[in-house]
Amino acid sequence: MFIACLAGYIWIYYVLLGNHNGNKSVEVCLIKHFTTIACPSCGSTRAVILIIQGKYLDALKINPLGYLVAMIMIFVPIWIIIDLGLGRKTLFVFYHKVELFLQRPQYSIPLILLILIIWILNNIKGL
């Protein structure tokens, strides 16, 4: 997870620098790149960048999953460092509990429906 967050930081830094000169080949989403169909997480990078810029409503409009990504990118690396420093595995335990929680149909089905709605909206918006 730490490496994924680090890759995310590098990508956001790259996008904020604007060195890509409008080149569409810098898209991260392989699904959209190969199929031209937006995935549920399309727009998350733009949403995180808007959050960094303080444009919270715009971020919510682009993709609400950007808030989840931003929280993960902020808290997970700190949590990992604390766990390593204290010799604990609290992040792993938390992850396992969340995984078990989400296996229950009363929680997983509404979340799947929410992701499907976001996916449909992403394609309607043309992300």
Image (cartoon, rainbow, N blue to C red):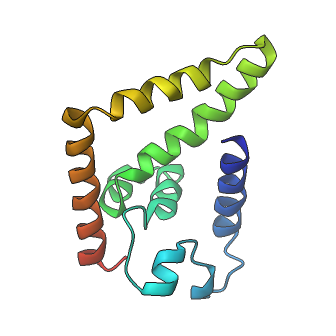
In the depicted structure, whether residue 48 falls above or below residue 22: above
For image coordinates 52% across by 72% down, the residue present is 29
Left or right: 122, with 17 as reference point? left
Image quadrant of residue 126?
bottom left
For image coordinates 38% across by 50% down, the residue present is 56
In the depicted structure, whether residue 104 falls above or below residue 83: below
For image coordinates 61% across by 17% down, the residue present is 90
Left or right: 94, with 113 as reference point? right
Image coordinates for residue 32, horizontal then vertical, percent:
46, 79
Left or right: 3, with 31 as reference point? right
Name the foreground residue: 118 vs 22. Answer: 118
Left or right: 1, with 118 as reference point? right
Q: Quadrant of the N terminus?
A: top right
Q: Can residue 92 be seen in this view?
A: yes
Image coordinates for residue 50, horizontal then vertical, percent:
47, 57
Name the foreground residue: 42 vs 48. Answer: 42
Image coordinates for residue 5, horizontal then vertical, percent:
66, 47
